[in-house]
Image: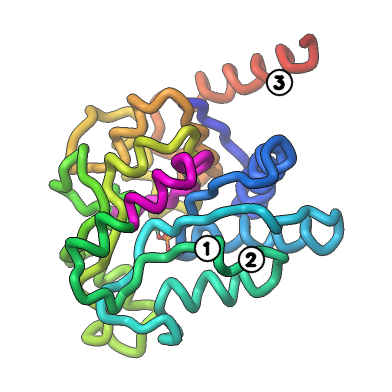
């Protein structure tokens, strides 16, 4: 795992957007795995800016979102459909037919989830997956105890997650208790992954996910065995990492090396 430590939220957003842009220029029909929540907002803002000011085109890009609350319709202001349209899709030149978000109103959920997996496969798999991390270590909505080989399915949300996400709803009772989420196995099949985290309240879980043992109790810890993960984290989110100085030392080395080749 490459650990990149930046000063603050703005800097991690810019760095993540820089990597997305680089991959997009290499492969205009990139298959992007997208995340919701507060963390990727800055990245999406920066991608919108790059589209407007630098002409970065998303015309051929295919996207798959990690998850959606079960029971929310796409026009619900807290649905991830709404989030993606408001914060990214409506502001770039993407073809909406190429975007995929789990259907929070799917009826035959088992069949629906299998079909979501098949669609990813048909596109050739996810090239670059963007991830945030929950305070319980979840990636997507893969809560503690999720199988590390899991695929897309319906999950019950952890109490911590319901509490954390209640800030977006009028009351905690309105927070859905279930979500359709791609699995840990689905995420691990991505060719490359960017893990983003910012702020003090992520420091404890980032230390466990990056430096602790690999365990289904912290599903993000499985990223340690993925061959191509870039963790882009800010100073606050890395304040509990034991080997922080080492990651900075390595990153300096990588920069110098890149200048030589
Ligand atoms: P956040 O959520 O970006 O709003 O902190 C992250 C997550 O739950 O995956």
Between 57 and 1, the residue placed more toward the observer is 57
Residue 4 to residue 84: above or below? above
Q: Give the range drawn in magenta.
A: 116-135
Could you tell me residue 128's position as x and y percent?
Answer: 52, 41
Between 216 and 100, the residue placed more toward the observer is 100
Evaluate if marks 1 and 2 touch, with contact meaning CB atoms under 8 Å apart.
yes
Residue assigned mark 2? 95
Task: Answer whether residue 120 is magenta in the image.
Answer: yes
Residue assigned mark 1? 99
Secondary element at tag 1: strand
Secondary element at tag 3: helix
> Around disc 2, counting alpha carbons within 10 Å, would you say few (fewer than 14), some (14 to 19), or many (20 or more)?
some
Q: Does the residue labelled 3 lie within 8 Å of ligand 1?
A: no
Residue 255 tag number: 3
The answer to whether residue 247 shows anywhere in this view is yes
> Around disc 1, counting alpha carbons within 10 Å, would you say few (fewer than 14), some (14 to 19), or many (20 or more)?
some
Q: Distance between the residues labelled 3 and 1?
A: 34 Å
Residue 200 to residue 218: above or below? below
């Amino acid at each position: 795992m490459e650990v990149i430590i930046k000063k603050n939220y703005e800097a991690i957003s810019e760095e993540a957007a820089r990597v997305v842009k680089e991959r997009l220029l290499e492969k205009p029909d990139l298959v992007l795995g997208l995340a919701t929540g507060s963390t990727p907002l800055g990245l999406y803002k920066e991608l919108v800016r790059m589209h407007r000011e630098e002409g970065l085109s998303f015309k051929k890009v295919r996207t798959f979102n990690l998850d959606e609350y079960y029971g929310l319709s796409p026009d619900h202001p807290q649905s991830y459909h709404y989030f993606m349209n408001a914060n990214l899709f409506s502001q770039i030149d993407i073809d909406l037919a190429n975007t995929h978000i789990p259907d929070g109103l799917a009826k035959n959920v088992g069949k629906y989830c299998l079909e979501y997996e098949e669609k990813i496969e048909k596109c050739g798999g996810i090239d670059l997956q963007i991830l945030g991390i929950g305070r319980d270590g979840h990636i997507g909505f893969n809560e503690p105890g999720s199988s590390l080989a899991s695929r897309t399915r319906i999950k019950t949300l952890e109490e911590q997650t319901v509490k954390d996400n209640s800030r977006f709803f009028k009351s905690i009772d309105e927070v859905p208790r279930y979500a359709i989420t791609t699995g840990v196995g689905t995420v691990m099949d991505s060719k490359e992954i960017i893990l983003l985290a910012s702020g003090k309240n992520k420091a404890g879980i980032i230390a466990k996910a990056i430096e602790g043992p690999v365990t289904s109790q912290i599903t993000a810890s499985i990223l340690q065995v993925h061959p191509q993960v870039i963790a882009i984290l800010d100073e606050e989110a890395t304040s509990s990492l034991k080997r922080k100085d080492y990651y900075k030392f390595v990153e300096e080395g990588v920069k110098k090396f890149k200048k030589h080749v």
